[in-house]
Amino acid sequence: MSDTKYMPPKVWVWDKENGGKFANINRPIAGATQEKELPVGKHPLQLYSMATPNGVKVTVMLEELLALGHTGAEYDAWLINIGSGDQFSSGFIEVNPNSKIPALLDRSTNPVTRVFESGSILLYLAEKFKAFLPSDPVKRTEALSWLFWQMGSAPMLGGGFGHFYAYAPEKYEYPINRYAMEVKRQLDVLDRQLAKNQFISGDEYTIADMAIWPWYGGVATNKVYNAAEFLEAHTYTNVLRWAHEIGERPAVVRGRMVNRSWGEDNEQVPERHSASDFDGKAI
């Protein structure tokens, strides 16, 4: 091991400069840093998010619901720029006290329903519109097991591997090796499951696929962390088959664009208020 030995101090002290790319937004305390109300559009569903993998889960779900004809799923999507600290505004914290995207307000209920945590939002929408979650108890439980698998596993991929491999100010062998090993194990779990099933939980496309695809499909197709070669993603052939199949769905293509403010112009829809916002985009 070439890493410099580190001895933790008796009491941890926050070093504001020691955080790499996200040092300006990471902090050990909660609460608002600015007083600012959130915008509200004309639709019942108001989404406050950014096109990170967690954000894409929800915009894909909403676009899939609209593609099925659920007009009640029309939504306004407002960009929350986490690099600028928008998630620490007083208005956003009223919707999500944990200051993480995505966050949703359902204004069709009385009182208004707030929903935060991406998995919770997917489940809320699936139950509200009775879509993308099997009604059969066995199949429903299987889908939910994989949904919660993602919620528990992705922090190892994102905050673990992704941080130390792609964003940390210094590269260290131990954390990269530790998290790469776990991510490869997780990809193997998915690959074995997808060898037997078209979709994650069986023969139905569900919220489990929508939750897992932005993270693990993104890694496999080199859209997340630019680490496909490092992780030998080409060896997970079933994950790649599934990732490409999901990625070609028109609603998924649209969902990836929403609240996106980087990359090619024809792939960006920083705010979404109607289907016309996709006019002229690469769909």
Image (tube, grey):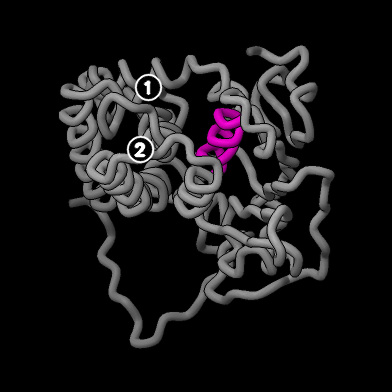
Q: What residue do we see at 42% from left, 29% from top?
A: 218
Q: Mostly what secondary structure, the magenta segment?
A: helix
Picture residue at 31% right of the left edge, 16% below the top = 241
Q: What stretch is highlighted in magenta?
A: 55-66
Q: From this view, report whether residue 87 is shown above or below residue 245.
A: below
Amino acid carrying mark 2 in the image:
Pro
- The residue sitting at 71% across, 64% down in the picture is 110
**Image coordinates for residue 225, horizontal then vertical, percent:** 44, 34
Residue type at mark 1: give it.
Ala
Q: Say the numbered circle drawn on residue 196.
A: none
Of 134 and 190, nearer the camera is: 134
Q: Is residue 55 visible?
A: yes
**Residue labelled with disc 2:** 134
In the rendered image, residue 10, in percent from the top left (x then y), is placed at 34, 87
- Residue that appears at 65% across and 38% down: 73
Residue 203, position in %: x, y?
A: 28, 24
Labelled disc at residue 243: 1
Snapshot quadrant of residue 270: top right
Q: Quadrant of residue 11?
A: bottom left
| SS category of the residue bearing label 2 | loop
Query: Compared to 26, does 238 lie above or below?
Result: above
The quarter holding residue 210 reads top left
Q: Is residue 69 above or below residue 208?
A: above
Q: Considering only order in the chain, which callout, 1 or 2, is on the residue closer to the N terminus?
A: 2
Q: Camera-side residue: 6 or 194?
A: 194
Task: Find numbered disc 1 in the image and state the secondary structure of the residue it sits on.
Answer: helix
Magenta-span inclusion, residue 218: no
211 left or right, relative to 186: right
